[in-house]
Image (cartoon, rainbow, N blue to C red):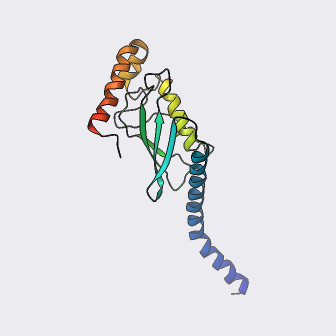
Amino acid sequence: MTTSDISSNSEAKISTPSRSSTSSANVTKRLQTELMSLMMSSPPGISAFPNDENLLQWTATIDGPDATPYAGLSFKLSFEFPNTYPLTPPTVLFKTPIYHPNIDFSGRICLDILKDKWSAIYNVQSVLLSLQSLLGEPNNASPLNGQAAELWDKDPVEYKRLVLARHRDDEETGLGSF
């Protein structure tokens, strides 16, 4: 075995764990950059911060958009980032109970950019803005809550009543707080 063979073998052995730590370092760097961007110039009505010391778990808040049934309401969400972020989307859940055609009672969200339309160009801010937009413009063709989808168009007064009732339940029980 020559010196170059030994050198090649050493590099091959080192590169496997190095790739894993490089990937983890890339996720950390990306999330730190996103956090800094949100802290410096977050659009009104959205915010997000890591939970304690874990950069892969965040708590976010979105305010309901004006001129929607959600105006004046605030919603907490959780973000869980995989080690493969941004190549794969984070898992995002509404923690504050919400009545909406594209969000089920467990807080799961039906939004294409969090599933098959995900791209590494998306970030926490773009996800939060998309969710804020979804509050005022649900995709009733793909509902998780069929009753909400039906009421959205047919009975806006009843829809608003159910939105407020679900949000009030959160305030009374404290379920939405972390």
Q: Reply above or below: 53 against 92.
A: below
Nearest to the observer: residue 94 or residue 21: 94
- Residue 86 showing in the rendered view: no
Nearest to the observer: residue 116 or residue 6: 116
Q: Position of residue 170 (x, y in %)?
A: 31, 35
Q: Position of residue 119 (x, y in %)?
A: 60, 42
Q: Position of residue 59 (x, y in %)?
A: 44, 46
Say whether residue 3 is left or right of residue 63: right
Q: Reply above or below: 15 against 52.
A: below
Q: Quadrant of residue 69?
A: top left
Q: Position of residue 5 (x, y in %)?
A: 69, 82
Say whether residue 169 is left or right of residue 7: left
Residue drawn at x 40%, y 15% as measured from the top left:
156
Q: Reply above or below: 83 against 96.
A: below
Q: How many marks?
A: 0
Residue drawn at x 42%, y 18% as measured from the top left:
152
Residue drawn at x 45%, y 59% as measured from the top left:
53
- Residue 39 showing in the rendered view: yes
Which image quarter holds the N terminus? bottom right
Point out the residue furthest to the left here. Answer: 173
Nearest to the observer: residue 22 or residue 70: 70
